[in-house]
Image (cartoon, rainbow, N blue to C red):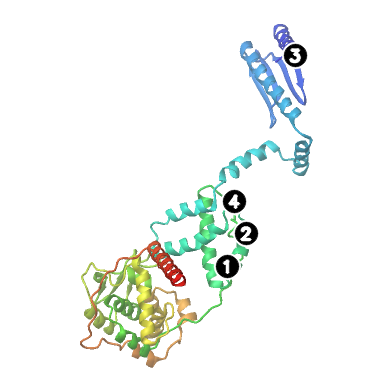
Amino acid sequence: MTEKIETKLKEALSQKTKFKIKIGGRKLDLYPAVKRNAWTICWHDGIARQRKFVSDESDLQTLVKKIVAAFEQGEKIVDNLTAERMRDYVEADTTLRGVNLAQLVKFYQEHVANQSISVSRLCELFLASRQENSPRHKSSIRLHLDKFSKTFRGSISAVKATAIDEYLLKNFPGPKTRLNHRVSICSLFAFGQRKGYLPAGFTEAQKTERPKISIVEPCTVSSHDMTKLLNECTNKRLASFLVVSAFAGCRAAETQRLKWKDIRHDGVILGTTITKTGRRRIAEVSPNLIAWVESLRGEPEDFVTYPEGEFYNLYANLYRLCKKAGVVREQNALRHTFVSCHLELHRDPPRTSKTAGHSLAMLETNYLKLVSREEAEAWFNIFPPEGKTYDPVVLRPKRRRKNLVAERNASFQQQQQQQQQKKRK
């Protein structure tokens, strides 16, 4: 504050008269408030008009000096603005007429500026938060998001719905695969929204086009093919998976969480930690399932088949068995066959619904009359042959992919060296 303004301020305070000052486009008014025995000071801070009552003259001088210094600093900033920056401010002010620019800046700092996180970093945080999920679910999410993070390397807030649609259509022509990847991407964006990295409302992932999946009739396995699979199978864990899935209707993931103590003569006890929906369910046991279980049963605390952490071994062995037996492998075909045969044999939809954990509407639309009554009777008459033996279960250590790649690179280099030696000779 200059000496002239300071002298003028002191004279106004001593004579208790009005004091006005204008710097650029900003004004400050000071006048005595007789009723309050104080001074009234009014000014505009760039957002709204401010007014304050001050009784002590020293505090009043300090406040006036502070406001005047802010006015002078603002004028310096305006003087240093280029013509291009001034045009930007004028354009923003005319476009958003009636909206305060300072409020917009504050909103941007709270909702946009603090949300800069890369796609790869958000994927890491999202995967770390999914430690309680099943191993297969985590593996699927990791597979989906690895490709997504390699394609979009910038900030998550910069990824738009049109870019996600192009990415899905270009890389995944199948609608079912595209839908699975879209679900993982939507979960990633919802996680970022919950953690404050994205604004509230519809995310860009939710704005993408949802692929339309055509309804396909469930695949079933004939009793003849099932008999071939069980006769060819010499792996005890794999045989247990086959019979529990085929004759109790358990889902593959549920079978991998089952222990032998859960399979009783009065039903298969599927607790809340086993079922897909988290609801307790008791699956019926048929006479042929009891016969198979007695020939395969292990220790009460042992898993019935390969646990969830070894699902790769389960499906690899199942693929080899189907190829050896000459049976076409279809996903969830054993469970679909059980539901269809149980519904046809008993003709009691509520009973089948409770056993399989399906809704009545799904039973009527998907499983009604998929098999004949003769086939349903033959399905539950598949019993274990006498004298059937199984190979002992040998746990093999899982080989790391890095080691396999290193071995292949070493063998390739060795082959090149041998070829070069032959050429020299």
Question: Few, some or many C-alpha atoms within 10 Å of disc 4 (few <14, some 14-19, many ≥20)?
Answer: some
Question: Few, some or many C-alpha atoms within 10 Å of disc 3 (few <14, some 14-19, many ≥20)?
Answer: some
Distance, label 2 to label 3, CA atoms, is 60 Å
Q: Is residue 5 left or right of residue 153?
A: right
**Upstream in sequence: badge 2 or badge 1:** 2
Give the residue type that dot 4 points to.
Answer: Ser
Q: Quadrant of residue 112?
A: top right
Question: Few, some or many C-alpha atoms within 10 Å of disc 2 (few <14, some 14-19, many ≥20)?
Answer: some
Nearer to the camera, 329 or 55: 329
Q: Quadrant of residue 44?
A: top right
Query: Residue 225, labelled with which disc?
Result: none
The residue positioned 45% from the left and 65% from the top of the image is 140
Give the residue type that dot 2 points to.
Answer: Ala
Q: Quadrant of the N terminus?
A: top right
Distance, label 2 to label 4, CA atoms, is 11 Å
**Upstream in sequence: badge 3 or badge 4:** 3
**Upstream in sequence: badge 1 or badge 4:** 4
**Residue linked to disc 1:** 171
**Residue linked to disc 3:** 18
Check whether the beta carbons of the residues at disc 2 and disc 3 lie within 8 A of each other.
Answer: no
**Residue linked to disc 2:** 161
**Which of labels 2 and 1 is toward the front?**
1
**Which of labels 1 and 4 is toward the front?**
1
Q: Position of residue 296 (x, y in %)?
A: 24, 78
Q: Is residue 292 left or right of residue 157?
A: left
Give the residue type that dot 1 points to.
Answer: Asn
The secondary structure type at the circle numbered 2 is: helix
